[in-house]
């Protein structure tokens, strides 16, 4: 019962996603909504995985400095890895969350140099923080509320003097005497002098214009003159005049007028006091933030002095009573029962058969991504239950679905609580041992997208992020036959014009099975074209290369500088595609001749795989020349559409006679139609 009772000030786990780690929050308020639910106003704490890489580097340097100053014992790589999961970053951000999302309590403490870091690993649900994270400014700052505990904050106590030994230290350099209790004045005389000092202070406030505005009544002026600042001034005056009442009296009222002593309570205006109360409500006793955001024209010492004087006023007592009344009306604690619903990522439940709860997604040979225990399907039937060869009775899916990563029950709980894996990966500076299937690493999605799996450096481990498996989409023989037999139902030309429209493949295949017995069984005749030699192909390409027209003089056409590094084939008039054939004989990239009935590369049925960013070549920009744009103007709109629908077919254009200036440059067969390979 006590474990499920949550109070204001507790550090708790909140679950906002079934697959992500818990959120760690501190309960500030418990409020009951209009519909009867309970909401918790909480302070946000962030993990290392929630901040950027630059801030993580800053946190690492701060941790190294702390270890050097506090002389921490050396830790193993795995302990250092797990210790990062115990570090949190405090923030000033508040949010409201449903109390039903609470999943347990934890303990968060401020780190000081007397703590042993290894002790946090020995305790469950134990975290620490030393830096403050600003989610808006994206900065990390040292916490100003540091508890000064340690050897460097201790006073150096000198040895005790022996009996009869004199103190040779100069007392004036060590301290300043402000009051001598063994003076010649009696207590009634001192009290009378203090009354005179208050009266002089009241008269001085009556003469001061600013004080008369702030304390318009005599009662307020007398109350201000009775504050400690007036009494301290009177006692200092007696000390400076060697406790001579006559001299001290003349010092209180010099020739220029009475001396006016005012403290911070009188120096501050009413509007400044309201700003201070508003800042105190927002930041608490964080005087640095109060001064920086609300009262930048005040010094830090002035803000601190005003706070302790403000606590002696009736205003502080009234606010304290109002807060106490509000606290009585609010909830002080709430009972949240233990969450027992199954997790959607759970893929195997004890006593369940394979195929239930996602258990059909098992794969042999996989292991836990954290502790590397084998994850197999050596299932045996025993007393009506299926038992696994692994020690863990439960397994959970972790990470993206295509990676098929698994975690055992204990590692899943560790992931939810601490936001990481137990074992460090090679990317984090430690090698995995005992892994039969090779090392694996866990990175965030941003890290996986930022690194290329094709980059290799000497002395560096291979990238451990799981890449997507290479796949191709290749049609079966029945599908290719169905496209021929059921061409009237499929309507490939219409489907090509409307790629967004779905095709009922099952109906097409069913109709194909009906028509196949009736279809002709004549064998398709194929003609094998012998492959020519490389020298012959190069010679034919050089002969059939188009003649480049002389460009008009003018500013050069800007092109990409990387275009020169690309392999240059024979260009057509449009300058977009290279040769696919020579002398009427098509040659594919692999050098094998096409047979009749085979598809060319432009009609390939294999789905082209997207090139990743790491292996993508330099971008190439194709700029149409002036002559190419002139040739396009001779195409009608219908011819342009036909060319766009069938880019593999040549475009024929019959041009008018060229100008006389180009007759000498063009071949004699200019009157023949020009074939454009677009």
Image (cartoon, helix red, strand yellow):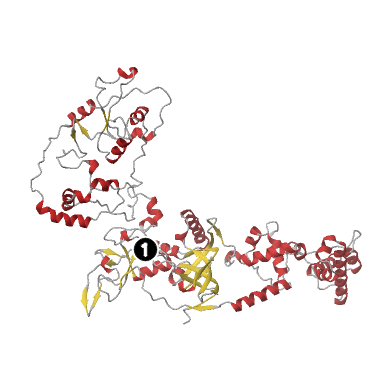
Can you tell which quarter of the image residue 670 is in?
Answer: top left
Decide if residue 474 is in sight here.
no
**Screen quadrant of the C terminus:** top left
Q: Is residue 487 above or below residue 360?
A: above
Q: Considering depth in this image, is 198 or 28 the residue closer to the camera?
A: 28
Q: Percent from the top left, x then y, of residue 467?
A: 31, 54
Q: Percent from the top left, x then y, of residue 582?
A: 20, 31
Outermost bottom residue: 1
* Secondary structure under the numbered disc 1 in the rendered image: loop
Mark count: 1
Residue under circle 1? 423
* Residue at image location 27% in from the left, 46% down from the top: 496
Neighbourhood count class around disc 1 (C-alpha, 10 Å): few under 14, some 14–19, many 20 upward: many
Decide if residue 66 is in sight here.
yes
Q: Percent from the top left, x then y, of residue 561?
A: 39, 33
Outermost left residue: 522
* Residue at image location 46% in from the left, 64% down from the top: 73
Q: Considering depth in this image, is 370 or 654 the residue closer to the camera?
A: 654
Can you tell which quarter of the image residue 503 is in?
Answer: bottom left
Q: In the figure, is residue 102 to the left or right of 28?
A: left
Q: Percent from the top left, x then y, of residue 21?
A: 42, 66
Q: Considering depth in this image, is 175 or 312 the residue closer to the camera?
A: 312
Q: Considering depth in this image, is 412 or 595 the residue closer to the camera?
A: 595
Q: In the figure, is residue 218 to the left or right of 19?
A: right
Can you tell which quarter of the image residue 562 is in?
Answer: top left
Q: Is residue 279 above or below residue 532?
A: below
């Amino acid at each position: 019962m006590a474990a499920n009772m949550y109070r204001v000030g507790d550090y708790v786990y909140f679950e906002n996603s079934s697959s992500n780690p818990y959120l760690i929050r501190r309960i500030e308020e418990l409020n009951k909504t209009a519909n009867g639910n309970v909401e918790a106003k909480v302070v946000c704490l962030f993990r290392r995985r929630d901040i950027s890489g630059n801030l993580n580097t800053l946190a690492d340097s701060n941790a190294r400095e702390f270890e050097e100053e506090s002389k921490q014992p050396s830790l193993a790589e795995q302990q250092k890895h797990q210790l990062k999961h115990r570090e949190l970053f405090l923030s000033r951000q508040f949010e409201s969350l449903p109390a039903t999302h609470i999943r347990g309590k934890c303990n968060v403490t401020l780190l000081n140099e007397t703590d042993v870091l290894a002790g946090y690993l020995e305790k469950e649900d134990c975290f620490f923080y030393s830096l403050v994270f600003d989610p808006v400014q994206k900065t990390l700052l040292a916490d100003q509320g540091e508890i000064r505990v340690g050897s460097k904050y201790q006073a150096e106590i000198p040895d005790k003097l022996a009996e009869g030994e004199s103190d040779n230290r100069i007392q004036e350099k060590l301290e300043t005497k402000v009051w001598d209790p063994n003076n010649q004045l009696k207590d009634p005389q001192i009290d009378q002098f203090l009354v005179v000092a208050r009266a002089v202070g009241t008269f001085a406030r009556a003469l001061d214009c600013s004080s008369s505005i702030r304390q318009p009544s005599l009662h307020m002026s007398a109350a201000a003159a009775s504050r400690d600042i007036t009494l301290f001034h009177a006692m200092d005056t007696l000390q400076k005049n060697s406790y001579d009442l006559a001299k001290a009296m003349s010092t209180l009222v010099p020739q220029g007028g009475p001396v006016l002593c005012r403290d911070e309570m009188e120096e501050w205006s009413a509007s400044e006091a309201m700003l201070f109360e508003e800042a105190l409500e927002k930041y608490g006793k964080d005087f640095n933030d109060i001064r920086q955001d609300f009262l930048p024209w005040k010094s830090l010492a002035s803000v601190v002095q005003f706070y302790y004087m403000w606590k002696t006023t009736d205003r502080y007592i009234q606010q304290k009573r109002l807060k106490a009344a509000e606290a009585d009306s609010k909830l002080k604690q709430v009972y949240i029962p233990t969450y027992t619903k199954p997790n959607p990522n759970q893929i195997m439940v004890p006593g369940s058969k394979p195929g239930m709860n996602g258990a059909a997604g098992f794969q042999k040979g996989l292991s836990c991504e954290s502790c590397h225990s084998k994850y197999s399907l050596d299932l045996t039937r025993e007393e009506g239950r299926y038992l696994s060869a692994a020690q863990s009775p439960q397994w959970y899916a972790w990470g993206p679905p295509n990676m098929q990563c698994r975690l055992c029950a204990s590692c899943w709980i560790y992931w939810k609580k601490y936001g990481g894996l137990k074992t460090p990966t090679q990317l984090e500076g430690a090698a995995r041992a005992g892994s039969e299937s090779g090392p694996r690493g866990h990175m965030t999605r941003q890290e996986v997208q930022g690194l290329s799996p094709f980059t290799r450096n000497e002395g560096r481990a291979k990238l451990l992020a799981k890449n997507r498996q290479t796949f191709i989409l290749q049609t079966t023989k029945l599908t290719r036959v169905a496209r021929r037999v059921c061409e009237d139902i499929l309507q490939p030309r219409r489907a090509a014009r409307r790629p967004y429209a779905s095709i009922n493949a099952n109906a097409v295949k069913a109709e194909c099975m009906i028509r196949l017995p009736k279809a002709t069984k004549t064998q398709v005749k194929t003609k094998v074209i012998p492959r020519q030699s490389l020298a012959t192909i190069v010679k034919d390409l050089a002969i059939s290369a188009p003649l480049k027209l002389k460009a008009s003089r003018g500013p050069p056409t800007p092109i990409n500088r990387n275009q020169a590094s690309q392999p240059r084939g024979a260009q057509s008039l449009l300058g977009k595609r290279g040769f696919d054939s020579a002398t009427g004989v098509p040659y594919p990239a692999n050098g094998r001749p096409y047979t009749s009935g085979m598809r060319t590369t432009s009609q390939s049925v294999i789905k082209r795989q997207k090139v990743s960013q790491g292996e993508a070549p330099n971008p190439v920009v194709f700029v149409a020349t002036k002559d190419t744009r002139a040739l396009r103007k001779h195409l009608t709109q219908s011819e342009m559409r036909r060319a766009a629908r069938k880019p593999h077919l040549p475009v024929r254009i019959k041009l008018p006679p060229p100008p006389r200036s180009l007759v000498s440059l063009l071949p004699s067969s200019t009157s023949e139609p020009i074939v454009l390979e677009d």
